[in-house]
Image (cartoon, helix red, strand yellow):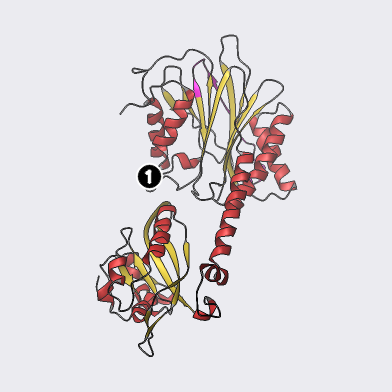
Amino acid sequence: MSRGTTPATANGGGRSTGPGGATLDYRDLFDAMAVPKIVLDPDLVVLDANRSYTELLGVPADTLIGRTLVDSLAQVPGGPPPVPLALDAIARCLRTGMPEVVEPTRWDLPDRRTGAVGPRYWMLLALPVTRPGDPSVRAVVVRVEEVDAVDVEDAHGNATPERMSWHSTVARMRAAAAAEREAAVALQSSVLTPPPHVPGLAVDVRYQPANRITRVGGDWYDVVLRESGRAVLVVGDVAGHDVDAAAAMTHLKGVLRTVAVEDDAGPAAVLDRAERAAAALRIEVFAAVTVAVVDPPEPDGSRRVTWARAGSLPPLVRRADLGAELIDERPGRLFGLRLPKERPESTCVLEPGAALLLFTDGLVERRGELLTDSLEHLRQDVEQVVDARLDRLADCVLARSTPIRGADDVAVVALQVDGEPAAGPEAVGTMTG
């Protein structure tokens, strides 16, 4: 890439048109930044370097661009660059999609004023470049900041790791991030518990977070067994993939669980009462929720299932003969809107061996694909599962249908009526094709 061209990380030619037709060239903006920055591709090849970075190293941009990071730094006069720490941090940034900070590191470079080579200290910040809905890291922006020696050297002019960490914010940032992860995992583990045993039913659940670091988000599942013998199944999705979303989800799940277990109300009534209770408790959230109530068995072993949808996706039924169908009837309003309109309910009867899947939209939504097409792909995937066991069905659906691993949270509740399901064409294995 030559100087003055648009870096590979820019979109739309690197230009943005503002009010009045004014055009902002992001290449010029990148070059005007006072803080030194470079852009690396996933192979650590330098895609771009701003003027501050090239002036800092004392080499022209053409010497750096197109080379790997290690090779480009080797062109700089002075001692060998301290690349191991930087490479480790950049590798973690590429792997996790999270920013990484490197504590002040010594690199002997010529002084820009005197030309004398001496000890200088640098902090690096690696920032991932992604696109909305796609968690893969397309590039890494590395920000370089010089730190005064007085901040890292002791009275004798020696820089120790303890003193460098003490005077940087790295140790505190890492400790805070670790504490947040531990708290988030504890929160999620306390909420997303295994389902209870329901006589006559096999029940399985799955949860996959979008946030691979904290492993929490706004999706949840729940299974409640009433004294009457009816089981209540819930899947829900509060917007967000962070600790705040998990906290809102926790409050809402608690409200729904309390309402669901207190009497034999139908699913629409459960949603309406929970919505009023959440409003009274000032739980101001919007969520897509499905509540399904499973009746006790009929004499032939079949089960009647009634559900209500609050802005959520339709459930999927796998029949005992392993055929599958989506029951896309009468969706209701989003939870939290508090509209006076009555919520509709839908009903089906599950024969022994039949299964029902409730899921959040992260299971099927695909970038650039119509939702109806994504749902049809899910139906086809379920029909290809030739192993009739419920746990294998849940595993296969999650593995096959999740469109972009980490793009959105996924919650799945699956139930199967006890009985002898018909065997598929090949009862060994998990999926055909």
Q: x%, y% of residue 205?
A: 54, 32
Quarter of the image for residue 47 reads bottom left
SS majority, magenta: loop
Question: Quarter of the image containing the N terminus?
Answer: bottom left
Badge 1 is on which residue? 369
**Front position in the image: 83 or 205:** 83
Is residue 334 visible in the rendered structure shown here?
no
Q: Residue furthest front?
A: 156
Q: SS class of the residue under badge 1?
A: loop
| Vertical relation: 192 (above or below) 162 | above
Q: Quadrant of residue 256?
A: top right
x 47%, y 57%: residue: 98
The residue nearer to you, when weighing 194 against 307, is: 194
Determine which quarter of the picture holds residue 263.
top right
The verdict on residue 167 being magenta is no
The magenta segment is 336-355
350 in magenta: yes
Residue 185 in the image, given as x and y percentages of width and height: 58, 46
Q: Position of residue 222 (x, y in %)?
A: 61, 34
Q: Amino acid at mark 1?
A: Glu
Looking at the image, residue 267 sits to the left or right of residue 432; the answer is: right
Q: In this rendered view, identify the residue nearer to me: 303 or 137.
A: 137
Most foreground residue, 118 or 21: 118
